[in-house]
Amino acid sequence: MLRPLRGLSMTEGNSARHSLKAKTMQDLSYLEALMGEPVGEEGYRDIWGLASAVEGRLSDLSLQTVGKARGLADGLGAYVRFLLAGAPDEETAQTLIAHGADYVYLAPGQADAETLAAFLRERKPEIVLLDDSITNRALAARVAQALDASLVTEAEDVRADPIDRALLVTRPIYEGIASQVIACLAKPQIVTVRAGAFPLPYPDRSRTGSIEQLSASWQPDAVQYEPAPEVASPPALTTARIVVSAGRGMEDAEGFALVQQLAARLGAAIAGDRGALDMGWIGPEQQVGALGVIVTPALYIACGIEGTTEHYLGMEGARAVIALCRESDAPLLKAADWGIIGSPKEIVRALVEAMG
Amino acid sequence: MDFSFPPEMVAFRRMVREFAEEEVRPLAATIDREDRVPWETIPKLRQAGLLGVPFPQKYGGAGLGEMGYCILLEEMGRVCTSTATFIGAHIGIGAMAIYLGGTEEQKQRYLVPLARGEKLAAFALTEPGAGSDAAAIRTRAVRDGDRYILNGTKIYITNGSFADIISVMAVTDPALGARGGVTAFIVEKEYPGYKVGTIEDKMGIRGSATAELIFDEVEVPAANVLGQVGLGFVTFMQSLDVGRVTLGAACLGGAETALEMAIRYARVREQFGRPLAHLQSVQFMVAEMAAEIEALRSLVYRTAWLVDTKQPFTKEAGMCKLLGSEIASRCVDRAMQIHGALGYSRDFPLERMLRDSRIAELFEGTNEIQRIVIATELFREAGVRIRP
Amino acid sequence: MRIAVCIKQILDPRAVRLSRSREAIDPRQAARIVNPPDRYALEAALRLRERHGGEVIALSVGARDVSDALREALAMGADRAILLSDEMLAGADASGVARALARAVEHIGDVSLVLTGERALDTGGGTLPARLAQELGWPVVTDASEPQLEDSILRAFQRDEKQRWSVSVALPAVLAVTRQREKPRYPPALRIAWAYREAEVETWDCDDLGLSPEEISARHTEERNLVMPPERNLGFILSGSPEEAARSLVAELRGKRLI
């Protein structure tokens, strides 16, 4: 059951078309000749994407997404067409092209589901890639529901089955303990791509593509958004994704301040071992160990903690552990995915710097 | 035979476990160190309806019977013996005495607010000269028209320092003594002449208040006689029986925690180049703990079933208390042995659990009394009447 | 005000283990529980009811044993519980489930707010709230917290990847609630006893909702194999000066998307 959509307000504006460079894009006719039929099933073809330009820039995620779209397109024999929303200009459009897009359609404003669904219904893309974000997940879900499309969110990997062209998308399940491969059965195949899932493509400034202005009018959002003051609340220790934990190896208050900086930089909860409690850096409610709190973060960064069994009992559930230790025989190094041996103070300082 | 819990019990345990983990465990060390009652937990217990679990709904309870009550105390016993003791004294013996022995009017007036948690209860039997030998109590109740005048002192009364409603045993006929001369009364804390005396400084269960209660010419309306005049022991022994089952449940919880801690530690602590789990001495300890816990669990919940299906359970209740307290003490002791010096640290729960577990062998009838209770029942079944 | 809360029964994600040898999820230790974010949604609904009056109706889709999740909702304070149960729904994916739930919301009638958890913590993709909104033709606010009602305008907070927003939307609307601040209440013992012994969970099937098989049974995606996380290789030491080691560590962490 598809609900009637509001009038399609977005069409390619011929008058506004200002194609810029000679088209030297991929010619797919050889593929079609080889297969004896148009590429893609039921007229669903090409890879579409949606990116948003903010203050003349595209996010790294958007560039990763267009790079992935390019890779899929090369494998499948397809064009990469991107809708560029937000405040698009020619320069951002060129950036998209340099990173792999063939066609860029300028569609200023905030994309909405009704208009996008209507547009995609008309254009019949084989694949639609979006950056994974709270907003785009909702957008993609509405569009997928309206089009009876397949949708996979939070993709960590996207491959196309070489035989039937179906996308095989990998996404995390059970809060990340494993990942599930999901095959898309319906077209369009919509995927939201997680940040960092794919490398930043190398821009090729000599790539050419077409830029078109759409006589776009996205529908206004029924939801009003206003910036709200931040409520400064570090994550609770027991539910934090990242825990940064200090030990005596941080030496003094200055050392502990570095640990706090590192935690702030990562949005992590601050904790410590029994030594940190004795030093007065943390309260008993922040002490990790059998004598204190048991934590199960995705990442536990132990700064200047040599590691006792007592401490280990408090953090053994961490999915990844980093140990910054002075001594090469520190017990915690054996339980850590990564260890660095040296002055914990200097290492933490270097870490904060390396994170930029 | 179906050993599975009905769905409402599964859901109830899930709720209580979450409550215990979120609200009770974080305070367990604090109230022990500060030697105080977990006041901040009591309104939450009331809101979650946990202060009247076994009583029928018409008396303000949850209607979950002895089985629900055992689940409550097992889960509380897992995280905090003091809180389990507070609940046990309130529900299990304080309010239970009114539920089992009270008139309809007394239940409406006293049990309903207790079950709702609006008022808190205590149970006053022990005296300086009478503990296991309950018949030796000296608190006197003398009839004066439509009231009784109470004089005497009770000691070691759990919740005594703050209880609103106290079930009290007093001698009404010294000549008859234990056989017809002792009566149970309901005393409100506002009655003139009722005073809280010394608060005990205890080795364990420091988060539960144990007080001396002084009755100095306290006037109690005759309408507050619990059960029949002269038959106070019958009333009190019934509620003590029920309390012993759930005390076994609380011990079960403590023993489970000790076993879980032992396994967790033995898994990761390395000595002689490998985890303790590979040492046979440790394996034996863990196996014995698990076997005893499994036996205790079966005993406790089978006895709860006897209570809920209105079958005799005095003998089994004594076994729950006897075995429960001994198994809990042994399990905590073994867990401490496995933990070594870490377990002896005052910052570690085992030290508190060791101090807390010892009381269960002493209160609500010492384990020696439990053996007598069990033996008396056994010989009664064989036609022999044991005389104390 | 009539509020519908959509809840899902899932395997307790804290107790789910991986079986590397079988490359599968090992659910043996995991109890079936109400998806934790859905309990926050129910709590938000109960608070709105306490303040503005009305009725809270819990909705779920699944086999009969899912009624336990709905009984938990009743125990927490929901006024009614409705289970959409039909063999046709057994194979439905997120699209079909959203369609069935939307139809049920319409069938209940007079619902002005649908609340649900931000996502199902098992295998959920977090798409249900928006799909449901699409089916109902209502606006949706995802990842919302602390909903408040003022003259049929719903206000809430939303935190996206960059910042915190104050959002407002006219009812009717769909709101997906995050796990924040206002913790779900403990179901009172008395209500647990009532919910599991006496309360009625209404059961609706596709006929009741006028749903045809084509509308709900189309499969859009198919689950294939699991990908196990790589085995941890413990004890790896990064060498070099503190600066070099720190740089390679940051690169490793970014590569593994840990930061």
Image: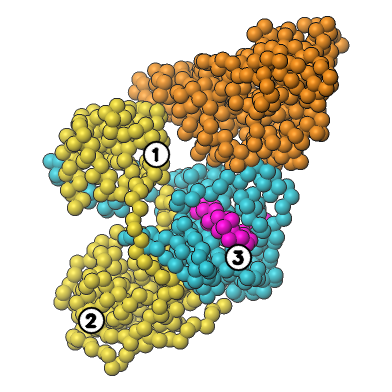
Residue range of the region highlighted in magenta in the rendering: C36-64
Q: Which chain does orange denote in the image?
A: B
Q: Residue drawn 37% across and 75% down?
A: A111
Rendered location of residue B69, percent (x, y): 67, 33
At label 1, the amino acid type is Val
Residue at which label 2 appears: A209
Residue at which label 3 appears: C1
- The quarter of the picture where residue B232 lies is top right
Chain identity of mark 3: C
Q: Is residue A39 magenta?
A: no
Q: Nearer the viewer, mark 2 or mark 3?
A: 3
Residue at which label 1 appears: A295
Which color scheme does this rendered protein use? by chain
Colour chosen for chain C: cyan
At label 3, the amino acid type is Met
State the quadrant of the N terminus of chain A.
bottom right
On whether disc 1 and disc 2 are found on a single subunit, the reply is yes
Q: For the residues marked 1 and 2, what is the alpha-carbon distance in whole angstroms?
A: 51 Å
Q: Secondary structure at mark 3?
A: loop
Q: Is residue C48 magenta?
A: yes
At label 2, the amino acid type is Gly
CA neighbours of label 3 inside 10 A, class few (<14), some (14 to 19), many (20+): some
Q: Residue drawn 40% across and 28% down?
A: A291
Q: Secondary structure at mark 2?
A: loop
| Residue B330 visible in the snapshot | no
Residue lying farthest to the left in this orientation? C241
Q: Residue drawn 68% across and 14% down?
A: B216
